[in-house]
Amino acid sequence: MPHNQNHHTHNLTPREQKILWATVERYIATAEPVGSKVLLQEYNFNISTATIRNVLHNLDRSGFLIQPHTSSGRVPSEVGYRVYVDELLPSPSPQLLHTSKQAVAQMLPDIYVSLESILRGAAQILASLSGCMALVTAPNRYLLRVRSIQLVPVEAHKLMLIVLSDSYHTASTVVDLPQRLNADLLAEEVGILHNFLNYHLKGKRWSELASSLQWHELDQQFQSYADLLTASLQRLTSPHYSSEQIYISGLSELMRQPEFSDLSQLQGIIYFLEAEQAYLLPILDAAPPQKVVVQIGSEIAVECLQNCALVSASYCHHQEPVGSVGVLNATRMNYERAIACVTGCAEYLTEVVSQW
């Protein structure tokens, strides 16, 4: 299976596998604990309810199912979902993958002219197709090219260095200047430096910001700026300098789930998504090229997401992962549809950014 490599070792019999699969499927569909009678009626098991009850008891005792109340049926545990995703769920059919990809491509009209609008639109479409909250990260700076550079005096001896990319991503940093510069001279020199930086850096990859400057082409009086500006540009190319943008859509999809009827839990998730995006990026970026990663419950390692599952995949620029696509929902999500939708969206964005 392509979804995750964390296989749990176990020795389920074919019958136990089938009953675990049916229990998870039924619970995903209804959000109601699943009992032996329902399984017998809905899944045509050619065995007695007593036998099904016995298997459910064994799966419960082994940690694959949980019985919320003594009189109720069972619900999947984290381990049960893990086994279901890794070993019992078939890979999405080529037809389902094609349909998902086509749906994204057809729903994004040609009027989208910026990469930002494509990514924002892709997040909205992914949310509606999957029935989950969708998360799409902007391409990392590997892909970006420099559109322009601004130098803005902000105090007597401070400059704001602002870099704008071709997809209108901006990053800025403050440059502390030597105290000896006088104001009139600074204004003149900033103008010359502005032209110099734009001449050398416009159209360059973001990653080349600090390495593309030919300082020897400037007069000696400007050499005092060389180290300061080079250090500032290096800061802007650091992957830890500022978090990439994440486009989020489909909060209403989460609100529909009975698991989130407690608004305080939903508030925790919303706060995390809005305020802690730096922690979310590495979680989303866990997927290697051409793989879908499914993280369930405690595997996400974020307290407010312990009742959630995250399905994510990378999209690429010439085989190099540059951004991520993911869907987030309760652990009781439709994994087959989520995997197909994420895969289709990632493939579409790979085609788009490879032509960008």
Image (cartoon, rainbow, N blue to C red):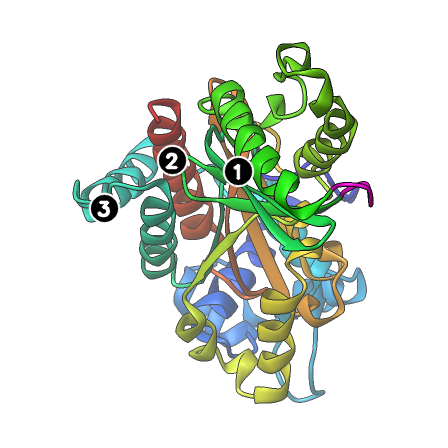
The rendered magenta stretch, by its main secondary structure, is classed as loop
Q: Residues within 10 Å of mark 2 (few under 14, many from 20)?
A: many
Residue pointed to by mark 3: 108
Q: Residues within 10 Å of mark 1 (few under 14, many from 20)?
A: many
Quadrant of image for the N terminus: top right
Residue pointed to by mark 1: 323
Residue 326 to residue 321: above or below: below
Residue pointed to by mark 2: 349
Res. 51 in view: no
Going from N to C along the chain, the mark reached first, 1 or 2, is: 1
As measured in the structure, the alpha-carbon distance from the residue carrying label 1 to the one carrying label 2 is 9 Å
**Residue 103 inside the magenta-drawn segment:** no
Locate residue 3: give its quadrant.
top right
Q: Are marks 1 and 2 in contact (CB under 8 Å)?
A: yes
Going from N to C along the chain, the mark reached first, 2 or 3, is: 3
Disc 2 element: helix
Q: Amino acid at mark 3?
A: Leu
Segment tinted magenta in the rendering = 177-181
Going from N to C along the chain, the mark reached first, 1 or 3, is: 3
Q: Amino acid at mark 2?
A: Leu
Residue 28 to residue 216: above or below: below
As measured in the structure, the alpha-carbon distance from the residue carrying label 2 to the one carrying label 3 is 11 Å
Q: Amino acid at mark 1?
A: Gly
Residue 304 to residue 281: above or below: below
86 lies left or right of 199: right
208 lies left or right of 69: left
